[in-house]
Amino acid sequence: MRAAKLPVWADLTLVPLANVVAAFFVSGLVVLAIGENPFNAMRVLISGSLGSLEGISFTLYYATNFIFTGLSVALAYRAGLFNIGAEGQAYLAGLGAALVCLSLPGLPAIILLPLAIVAAGVFGAIWAMIPGWLQAKRGSHIVITTIMFNWIATSLMAWLLVNSMRAPGSMQPETKSFPPAALMPKFDGILSLFGIAVPSSPLNVSFLLALIAAAFVWLLVWRTRLGYEIRTLGANASAADYAGIGTTRVIVITMGLSGMLAGGLAVNEVLGVQNRLLLEFTSGYGFVGIAVALMGRAHPVGVVLASLLFGMLYQGGAELAFDQPRITRDMIVVIQGLVVLFAGALEGMFRTPIAAVLGLFRRTDEPDSRSA
Amino acid sequence: MTLAIELIDIHKRFGNVHANKGVNLSVQKGSIHGIVGENGAGKSTLMSILYGYYGATSGTIKIDGREARMRSSRDAIALGIGMVHQHFMLVETLSVLENILLGAEGGFWLSAGKDAMRAKLATLAKTYGLEVDPDARVADIGVGQRQRVEILKALVRGAHVLILDEPTAVLTPTEADNLFDMLRVLRDEGKTILLITHKLREIMHVTDHVSVMRRGEMAAHFETSHTSVEEIADAMVGRKVSLIVHRGPANPGRVLLEARDLVVRDMHGVTRVDHVSFSLRAGEIVGIAGVSGNGQSELLEALAGMQRLTSGGITLDGAPIDTSRLDPSHMRELGLMHVPEDRHRHGLVMSFEACESGILGFQHDAAYGGALLDRAAVESGLAADMETYDIRPRDPRLTTHSFSGGNQQKIVLAREIERGPKVLLVGQPTRGVDIGAIEFIHKRLMALRDAGKAILLVSVELDEIMALSDRILVMCGGRITGERTAANANPRDLGLLMAGVTDKAA
């Protein structure tokens, strides 16, 4: 049976909404099962993430990571490539940013920051282009190679941080702090310049970069010739062949851009918050990006919305774990897992009923193309 | 006269689409009954109702005179209705016997069921002459044999009514004749056969009765021996149609495309195109006839730049092409356009808006803006084509798959023709296209030829080749086995060449 056809707006709003409601319903049952009040948990979750300026700031800070990694996965997905490697690409991007910040310490922020951001993008891109090239030229499946490249990235970074990049005299596997010029401007700092006092949070200019990246991805995919070729390749590779689209070129470029977007995670974490390179700073955001992209239906607007939801879950979840000790951080992972399950794996479950309900209100004047 | 099937006042609505409007159909027991209609006429919907896939919105179904309620295809099978789908539902890695056994294993252990089935198959083979090797792997047998397996699947489940959906779409003319012989035997043994097709020649050839559907309604019933192809075609379209292409004398000009000694080997090293040479002049249509799978597709793709040449040379309008670096977009720039054989696989991106499919292969055209694609130009481009080619519905933003086969094909044709090619390669231009559109497409191709363009036409429909071509090349086993001019071609002669009986051998 063919999947029910829905108008774009319903596809981008109603379907994810139904998935999230279902995920929260089941999560509520789990909370109930461990003897807590699910409505109370829900209240804490929402007020913790959206109830205060501080909560909102943290939510947006987490969302920044998800927007970058979600866009990374979504863009590759448009070309029919399942990039599982955003985690490793972001990790390497951190290395690029760190090398710039540590080797050019005297530069002013206005030069150093853009250089560090570019370096992060380039390193992320290269780490993604290698699997892309292997896929295009050697037929090595991109899912397998990107997963392997995550492991290679983990080992490489551990080795570098322990052996060559560790700050002298430190026992921690991390570099020394970058010069202050290398710190992305924070929102609380910027707003205080205008006399507006907001609570301190890690939210920084990277969030704006993430929104710009989302707009850029939309423009690229739907309004440029390259985007046209990316979508053609993803939707019908034989037609791309027929059209004379250079498959290798498109795959390598798309993966490069995808890795570059993943590098945004390093910008937010390494340049925005940590101000140094440290072990495992990616902490799984790259993998959550896969769920974000699936839930956002590989569309930039959907990715931003899904990122906000996951930002809420991260921030609200932390509050919840603090407020109700019986709900641990692991419980939050369960809830996130349920969202991934409903939004990703069971994504099609509500499409048919939604289509049926919409069909009651809408005139269908499409011809019956079944007998073709 | 007893009726095997009686459908009375069947209505089916999908939302606001009224796919079947009060359809009545009576099928006599032990007859071959054809159902024809253009794409979207509602014949597949009707058959799906009969086979229990959809429930009818209202109406009565009678099987053998008794009213039947069908909630699923299981009910239909229990009532003795079998369906042979256009796309076979077989597991290629399993044997013929195992495929027939699927869903009728009859117990936990396979061997008992297998033995019983083997015996059953032997009986069926004797009664109907349906011979297949039960132990052959489906992957190893031909298309005609596979279809036979599908028919056997229905028969062992006790079907006495067989529905065949476009059964000859994948068959060679000989295989189709074998199928028709088989159907006649089945009919003579008392089975009832419903044949859904759009090929009127087959209807005339094999059916006893024919029902014509148009726009969800039964437009006409005929006794086949008392009707003609023209009468059926008029009933299908609802107006007079001309099945004959009017063409003036050809005025061949200079050679626009020349192929010298082309050889194409596929990835397994099998030679698909075997030392093929020909030339194509301005203002002529050269047809390549042949049974599907004899190298025509590979030849077409090689000329279009999609397929690597093992050896040989191509000259386009006097200029040699660098065959080591064939590239479809380069060929387009040189004025060679290509209507591919399979529009779903190559010619269109079904999930794209129609206007986006309308620039496939031309996405780098300066007409579509600079760094960013000019959406307005993309849309107005197809909107203009929609007027000239009468593509319906006239909405360039509709997704490609919501157009009917004929309209999809017109989108491809408009894209390739309207850019003024020097040479047009056309593969199966009217496959899965309704009669009204066929008439239009043939006229367009003829007009292009009269405008002094060179057209290479590949088609498995011999009628089409003979109606359009000025010269006919016949391919068999990757070689050109003969050439005929339009004036001295006849189907029998071409059929021999298609079977590989060459002039030299004769």
Image (cartoon, rainbow, N blue to C red):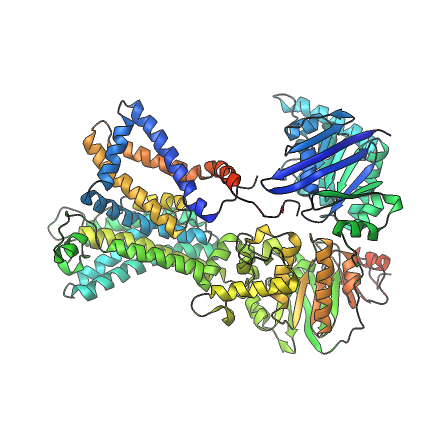
Q: Which residue is at a point 55% across and 64% down the rendered structure image?
A: B361
Q: Position of residue B424 (x, y in %)?
A: 66, 68
Q: Residue furthest right?
A: B226
Which residue is depicted at the point 37% across and 35% down?
A21
Q: Is residue A63 left or right of residue B504?
A: left
- Image x and y of residue A102, in percent: 18, 60
- The tally of labels here is 0
Q: Quadrant of the N terminus of chain A?
A: top right
Left or right, residue A239 beside residue B162:
left
- Residue A240 is situated, as x and y percent measured from the top left of the image, at 53, 59
Tell me what residue is drawn at x 61 percent, y 21 percent: B108
Q: Can the viewer see residue B169?
A: yes
Task: Where is residue A134? Give x, y as percent.
Answer: 43, 55
In the image, farthest residue toward the left: A169
In the image, residue B467 sits, relative to residue A46, either above or below, namely below
Which is more toward the observer, A330 or B105? A330
Q: Is residue A124 visible?
A: no
Q: Is residue A69 left or right of residue B105?
A: left
